[in-house]
Image (tube, rainbow, N blue to C red):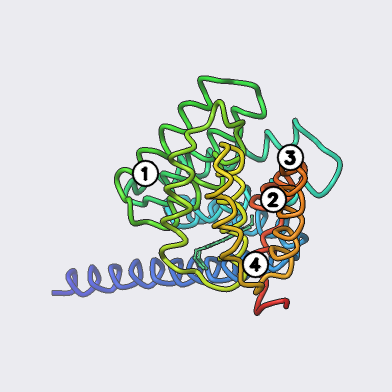
Amino acid sequence: MRKSVLFLSALSIITAVALAASTQDDDVLSRARSSQLEFREGNLEVAKPLVKMLEDAVAQSPDNARLWEALGHANMTLQGSMYAGPLDIPGMTAVGERARDAYARSLALDASSTLVKASHGMSQMVVSQLKGDGPGMAAGIDEMNAAVRESPKSIAARLTRAFTIIHLPPAMRDTNAVTEDLQFILGAAPGGRREDVLHVLLGDVYAEMGDLKGARAEYKEVSGASAFAAEQVRSRLTDLEKGAIQPASIAQVRMGTGTRCAMCHAPGTDN
Ligand code: HEC
């Protein structure tokens, strides 16, 4: 009798400790989420403290797959913010590797998340690209393809793949995959600025492949919810009159997918 009471109370202490830890983890995850939202709206300074907070959290709770996932996203965010300064390839590679390691830890604990699988492939590709490692890049692309094959209706997986491989030169890129992803995301009707910028990104892929009719059709869909996208369309239409779209304008919008999140995620419309 006594023994079982003792046992029960020991059990309840263990449960209480576990609950306290999970509440604390949930609290960290919700703070991480707000920081990501702030980053998306253009506050790049949040990236470093976010990584630190999550590094401390995984040191406390090394078995929480969601914390490792958040640490992976945080490192990718930090890497994105580094494009704003002078180009530091070794630094960016190291941060990308930390993202990849964190995603790998998350997958080892829970292999079920499509987004984590796609994100691991993304970090694998980005790190390999920074190192000039072709087979490593192909391996990362394969992982993203597998995630999309497994969950073709996952916007997160398609966004991750599209925004990663769109940066590859057309000769190396699976352009059909990019086009299909962007069309799928547009079909899910994100609306507003996001939709405007997505139409420009998709139109640019068509233009790059020589499909100017397809390109113009996408540009025409831009509503003006994003003044930036509308401005980009005006300059493309002028360029097309004169000949071809400037690769620099294509690059300007495309670069924003990894760095200028606010281009799509700023609140409201800017027109
Ligand atoms: C070209 C437009 C575009 C850019 C640039 C962009 N996103 Fe998104 N993002 C989207 C769309 C579209 C969705 C999915 C639908 C939605 O949530 O509106 C999305 C969804 C998300 C989501 C998941 C949905 C949520 O609210 O939890 C996160 C997280 C996210 N984006 C983060 C980022 C970050 C970080 C950046 C910058 C590195 C970024 N995005 C840049 C278009 C964009």
Q: Position of residue 194 (x, y in %)?
A: 58, 66
Residue at numbered disc 4: 35
Judging from the image, what secondary structure is the residue with disc 4 in?
helix
**Disc 1 or disc 4, which is closer to the eye?**
1
Disc 4 residue crowd, few under 14, some 14–19, many 20+, Cα 10 Å: many
Disc 1 residue crowd, few under 14, some 14–19, many 20+, Cα 10 Å: many
Residue at numbered disc 1: 147
**Disc 4 or disc 3, which is closer to the eye?**
3
Residue at numbered disc 3: 247
The correct choice, above or below, for 101 with respect to 204 in the image is: above
The correct choice, above or below, for 14 with respect to 116 in the image is: below
Q: Position of residue 78 (x, y in %)?
A: 69, 50
Residue shown at 48% from the left, 26% from the top: 138
* Quarter containing the C terminus: bottom right
Judging from the image, what secondary structure is the residue with disc 2 in?
helix
- Ligand 1 sits in quadrant: bottom right
Q: Residue 5: name its quadrant.
A: bottom left
Q: Position of residue 250 (x, y in %)?
A: 70, 46
Which is nearer the eye, 169 or 155? 169
Residue at numbered disc 2: 78
Judging from the image, what secondary structure is the residue with disc 1 in?
helix
What type is the residue that disc 2 sits on? Leu
